Amino acid sequence: MTILPSTDRRNQFIFPAALVSLLFIASLRIVLENLKNSHHNRSFFWQPGGGYRVVRQPVRVSNDEIIEKGCNIFEGKWVWDNVSHPLYTEESCPLLVKQVTCLKNGRPDSYYQNWKWQPDGCNLPRFNALKLLEILRDKRLMFVGDSVQRGMFDSMVCLVQSVIPEGKKSLKRVPPRKIFRAEEYNASIEYYWAPFLVESISDHATNHTVLKRLVRLDSISNHSKQWEGVDILVFESYVWWMYKPTINATYGNLKNVQEYNVTKAYRIAMETWANWIETSINTHDQKVFFMTMSPTHLWNWEWKTGDGGNCFGESQPIQGPYWGTGSNLDIMGIVKDVLGRLRVNVRVLNITQLSEYRKDGHASIYGERKGKLLTKEQRSDPKNFADCIHWCLPGVPDTWNEILYAVLLQDYRKF
């Protein structure tokens, strides 16, 4: 005869089983919700001891994202593309500063946003913010240089910030640094103000405008201690050197101020920087890039029959071969020479020629001067007040970052 368990005994079996089932269903729902909402490329595996183990999958680099061997991505042309470009808008990136929001500041045309750089013989991979963030996971990317380099930082932040949920990103200003954090990736994109790379009396992050510039050609430690251990460093230094043909500088003795030819001073400063690179960079864990000069378009007689004007009113790129006098070939030669003698692999982002064509992309009269938007009177005098050094965003600096992304993607694939 079969003896059935009592009601109490049945409950002893039913309630634990039901509880286990409910816990399992709840856990499964959480996992599915995470899979739905996650921005990461990851998989979930149930562990025998209980709970789920997250395994991050590598970023997949498709065949159309591979730059063909031998293709020079810095040689090509600008093509009109109002479908895929711009990659973001002023409205979609509230972190942009007034210096670069040209449309908001009154620029009447937006054509400068719709040009795409097309290398000869190959294509740049389309920028993918999620892939870049995965590449940057647990890493620091730092842009070092002047306000042009700050524009590249602003651009990179705008390129990635929209895919990060609110509450999972932040932007802090810790002079002379700006730090953008992507919390879920434990990644940071940073900017560090160092207009000469070596130390100078213009190193204050906000109060750096001086009538008589002075640099310390052999001193870099105050800056370099902020660069130590950074995973990806992107350096740039040019326009602050070109204020005059000569510059006041010290070497060794701080009291011994001499007037140096700018190209000579630039070489000495670059050698000081290069010595730090040689002695401080761990090539297994760190990547170093040097960005060539960002061109200026100060005199329109260089690309057309001029009227004494500049980049103001320009809405189309220059077609055909062009090299402006705002880009110093001697400086280019110094960069090539100093980097060529380094044992550490510092890769050059040669953005000068491709940016030379973009006379249309500057802030012109639609930016800031000394931290303030131009007045009506100043805008009516573009010959004296147009900014033909800095760039509108979205715009040309986005292409610089597309190129940087392409290189980092190739590195990731090889690794």
Image (spheres, grey):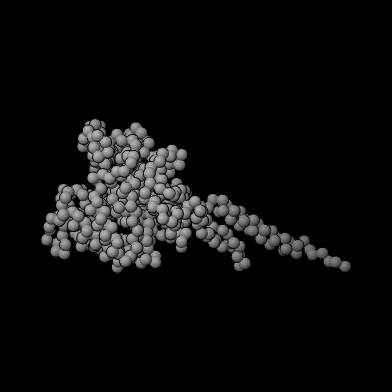
Residue sitting at 43 percent across and 44 percent down? 87
What x and y, as percent, mark residue 346? 33, 60
Q: Can residue 271 be spotted in the picture?
A: yes
Res. 8 visible in picture: no
In the image, taking residue 210 as reference, residue 392 lies left or right, namely right
Image coordinates of residue 133 in percent, x first then y, are 45, 54
> What is the quadrant of residue 277 in the picture?
bottom left
Residue 175 x %, y % = 29, 53
**Figure check: 106 above or below 159:** above
Q: Would you identify the image quadrant in which residue 232 lies?
A: bottom left
Q: Is 332 situated left or right of 7 in this image?
A: left
Which residue is rendered at x = 15% and y = 52% of the image?
A: 246
Where the N terminus falls, by quadrant?
bottom right
Counting the numbered discs, the total is 0
Residue at 44% x, 53% y is 67
In the depicted view, which residue is nearer to us: 409 or 191?
A: 409
Relative vertical location of residue 111 with respect to residue 326 in this rendering, above or below: above
As drawn, the residue found furthest toward the right would be 1
**Residue 253 placement, left or right of 295:** left
Image coordinates of residue 265 in percent, x first then y, are 19, 57
Residue at horizontal 47 percent and vertical 52 percent from the top? 65
